[in-house]
Image: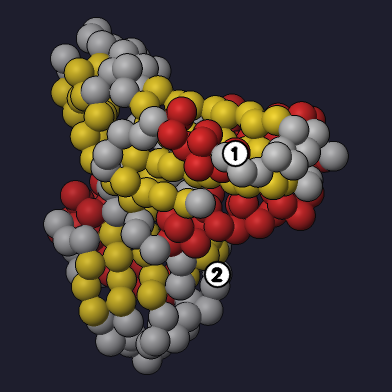
């Protein structure tokens, strides 16, 4: 699974993109956030307040309850501020 | 036409691209967003020295295309041009262009406004401001969310 981080989530985690194997017990984005947070350090900081985090699944905005599979592309970022 | 680019744009040229040889167009409405020289944040020095725009390549184009499609379903639009700049910009720089051509003016006005409102809330761009007090990611404005929501009521 490809996981991407943008804006301050990229700064806090220290990476823009990574490939991970989805753990068996993780079936939705909320579960993935928990898994990433468990790594500690910058990941724990990045996801310390998930009300500030938005998620895209295969380039579409979704809620954290969205189901995921190993072939998906997930992106984490703050609320958008373009224009 | 949807374009994400570091380079500046020229609205005269963009107007020519969509209007030349297209005599069915009755009017064109353009919105040009500029980089302001002040930040909305609380702090001692709010003067912006530069702004850097990051985006999610692929998703940006996908979301902008969806917004254009939604506008075209709602109004009869002849041409739509959306250009958004990325990278480092200075106060006064052009940042975004939404240009909508239609047979009738109301479709052009409403279409441009609709596209801009959803661009603000759906297109994955992020602004980082540099002021005298440091560097800060710009936060979401609730007024922008409200602007997009007003189209749902109609």
Chain of the residue displaying label 1: B
Query: Is residue B149 visible from the viewing direction of this image?
Result: no
Residue at 40% across, 23% down = B34
The residue tagged 1 is B19
For the N terminus of chain A, the quadrant is: bottom left
Tag 1: Cα neighbours inside 10 Å, few (<14), some, or many (≥20)? Answer: some
Q: Which residue lies furthest to the front in this view?
A: B21
Q: Position of residue A15 (x, y in %)?
A: 17, 61
Q: Where is residue A64 in the image (x, y as percent from the top left)?
A: 50, 65
Q: Which of B147 and B99 is in front in this view?
A: B99
Check if mark 1's residue and mark 2's residue have beta carbons within 8 Å: no
Q: Which of B65 and B14 is in front in this view?
A: B14
Q: Nearer the viewer, residue B80 or B138?
A: B80
Marks 1 and 2 sit apart, C-alpha to C-alpha, by 46 Å
Query: Is residue B133 visible from the viewing direction of this image?
Result: yes
The residue tagged 2 is A65
In the rendered image, residues at marks 1 and 2 fall on the same chain: no
């Amino acid at each position: 699974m490809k996981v991407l981080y943008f804006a301050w989530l990229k700064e806090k985690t220290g990476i823009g993109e990574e490939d991970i194997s989805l753990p068996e017990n993780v079936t939705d984005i909320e579960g993935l956030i928990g898994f990433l947070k468990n790594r500690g350090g910058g990941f724990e900081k990045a996801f310390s307040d998930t009300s500030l985090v938005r998620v895209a699944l295969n380039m579409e905005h979704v809620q954290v309850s969205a189901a995921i599979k190993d072939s998906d592309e997930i992106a984490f970022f703050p609320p958008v501020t373009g224009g | 036409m949807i374009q994400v680019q570091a380079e500046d744009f020229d609205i005269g040229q963009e107007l020519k691209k969509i209007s030349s040889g297209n005599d069915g167009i009755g009017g064109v409405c353009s919105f040009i967003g500029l980089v302001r020289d002040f930040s909305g944040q609380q702090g001692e020095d709010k003067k912006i020295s530069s702004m850097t725009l990051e985006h999610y390549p692929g998703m940006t184009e996908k979301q902008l295309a969806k917004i254009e499609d939604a506008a075209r379903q709602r109004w009869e639009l002849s041409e739509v041009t959306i250009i958004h700049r990325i990278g480092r910009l200075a106060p006064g720089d052009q940042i975004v262009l939404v240009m909508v051509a239609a047979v009738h003016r109301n479709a052009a006005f409403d279409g441009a406004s609709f596209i801009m409102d959803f661009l603000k809330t759906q297109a994955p761009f992020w602004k980082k401001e540099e002021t005298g007090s440091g560097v800060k990611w710009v936060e979401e404005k609730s007024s922008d969310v409200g602007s997009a929501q007003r189209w749902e009521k109609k």
